[in-house]
Amino acid sequence: MFKKAVDAKSQQRLSGADRKKLKRTVRERFPAVSDADIDLLLPPKAEISVAKYPNRILVYGLEGDCPLFFDADGRGSEIFPTVYALWKVPDLLPAFILKGGEVSRYVLGGADLMFPGIYIPPDGLPSFSAGEPWAVKVPGNPAPIAVGSTTMNSTEALKAGLRGKALKICHYYRDTLWELAENCSIPNAGFLEDVVFEDPALYSATPASESFEDNSSAGQMTAMTHESTGDASLADGAAPISDSAPCTDHSVVNEVGELVNSAMADLQVTENASGCDSNVDDQHPLSVEDVDSLLDKCLLQALHTTIKDKDLPMLGSILWSSHVLPCRPSGVTLDIKKSSYKKLSKWLQSKSTGGLISVKEDKHKKEATLVSVNRKHLEYTSFKPEKKKVDNNEQSAKNISGEGQSEKTLDVVELYKASTHVNPILAAVGAETGKLYTAPETSQIVFAYIEKENLVKQTNKAIVVLDATLCDALFKGAIKKGTTYPTEIHKKDVGQTFINRMQAHIGVTRGNDTVVRKGALKPIQIITERRQGNKKVTKLSGLESFLIDAEALASELQKKFACSTTVSELPGKKGLEVLVQGGVIDDLGRLLVEQYGVQKRYIEVLDKTRR
């Protein structure tokens, strides 16, 4: 985001109202911040300026000092602290700890943070959601080196085997935003020009024995983490992290550690180290034959337990991440690249050749789709699915999975607000006129009024006699001039007629986010058209109504369909449009239904290439 230097379009001081708004936004965005921290970052009597950039980014800082916050979208919803702010308040954000100082070279080079480059504690990573702001730290150095937003939640990360991109880096030490400060500074001597190591001051203030014990335990933990993650690389195109690389990067500390180790041999300092080695030795690497066998077993387990015929057809990527991987044994890493098939599509094609499943492959996208399952196949009928024992760890994992699933779950509710026509009815029964009601609640209000005023016809209980108030609420302004107002109405028509006289709203909930909008819900539009001869492009719009992040969806589509994607603003409208290269109209609709919970009735599809 700040890799290249861009000149600001304008810069001005914040007014008193804007200062209060900024502090309120910071307090809401970062719940861990205290009032004292806010006063430290944004002193009450200091002048605060805002710089506007062509890419809609706003940068807030103290005049004559350093930038402290930046607004990534210019709307106040994606405010991040700079490294200068994090150096003043290090605990402002939760932080991922790198495996070692050498890993920081990639982050400071502009690469996003990958899960293999993160140190995983023995009890696992804490729970997090997609799109959350997190910082990045080096072990042994309390000052963060970068800040970004998570690309997936903790449940998805566990399903992916802690592989792939963890953090989309927005700002890092020594980028152009860091250089905006009039006096660029560093928090400690561990910050070098292109890499960050542990703070030497912490080691000089720590007794040698304690330093060695901490270093030894950190080295053991790094070895265990490297064993679990394999030879995964930090970033696309980046060199893999060597398992032999120590967590500490200063030879002086290692030499001191060796001297202390020899001097303290009688104190059994190596007892913990031997225990750690035994744990590592227990995790034997699987052979190619073992991986092939485990793949088949996980597929059969998934076909028996989680894959239903109504879910088909299913993309191979969804089959792998949502069904096959969750069926692997606990503590085992399953990697298709370590099998004899090397690719997911080849493995599925081999199972299709054997008759167990039916697979269709798209030659352009090179992704296989599971079409059907032969549940009478001998391999299927002879397999007995395992019943997993639920222990405390699995139960907590299920709880995390439920939280992640709730974030993907979409809930659309039709709501109604009182208009001037029906306000007398609500006032008569003591209902709030400014509140939003569901359809059943709205019907209950009108029938409560009917019961209160005893308007049910005595000779025919199915008929309601209209008094002046109820007649005006139901028909005033809706009856043509010269037409007589009705005096009676059937009970079955009362509720819907009353609802039609109220203002319609739509409530959309996804996870913990809820938005209520006036009027009907506009559907998502998927349009495919031709450009430049025979090239096809697919456009998506209307994602904001369903609380779908256009940037995150574009990134996901780019990986899933192996094509380029762009996000742009719609001309003359509020909202963003995602442009996907290729005619993927059917796959996009299926993905919105399966992964984002959008009902088909809210998706409009238009293929202009067939005209």
Image: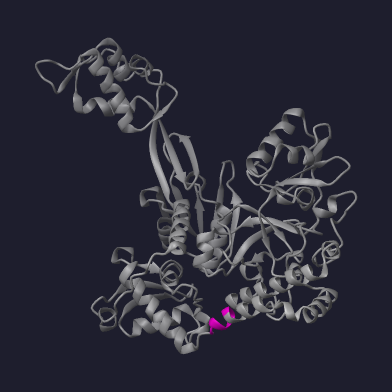
Please state if 509 lies on the left or on the right of 132 as rendered.
Answer: left
Against 514, is 337 above or below? Answer: below
Q: Quadrant of residue 104?
A: bottom right
**Span of residues in magenta:** 279-284
In depth, the one of 475 and 346 nearer the eye is: 346
Q: Residue at x 59, y 80 (%)?
A: 280
Q: Residue at x 58, y 75 (%)?
A: 228
Q: Is residue 53 left or right of residue 417?
A: right
Q: Quadrant of residue 130?
A: bottom right
User: Which residue is found at the position 40% from the left and 23% from the top?
Assistant: 418
Percent of width and height locating residue 202? 82, 62
Left/right placement of residue 571 relative to residue 169 reads left
* Image quarter (top left, top right, bottom left or bottom right) of the N terminus: bottom right
Residue 524, relative to residue 107: is it above or below? above
Whether residue 534 is visible here, answered yes or no, is: no
Chosen colour scheme: one colour
To which quarter of the image does residue 211 belong? Answer: bottom right
Residue pictured at 46% horizontal, 59% vertical: 396
- Examine the structure image and report whether residue 107 is included in the region drawn in magenta: no
Main SS of residues in magenta: helix
Can you see residue 397? yes
In the rendered image, the residue lying farthest to the left is 459
Place of residue 192 in the rendered image (x, y in percent of width and height, measured from the top left): 85, 65
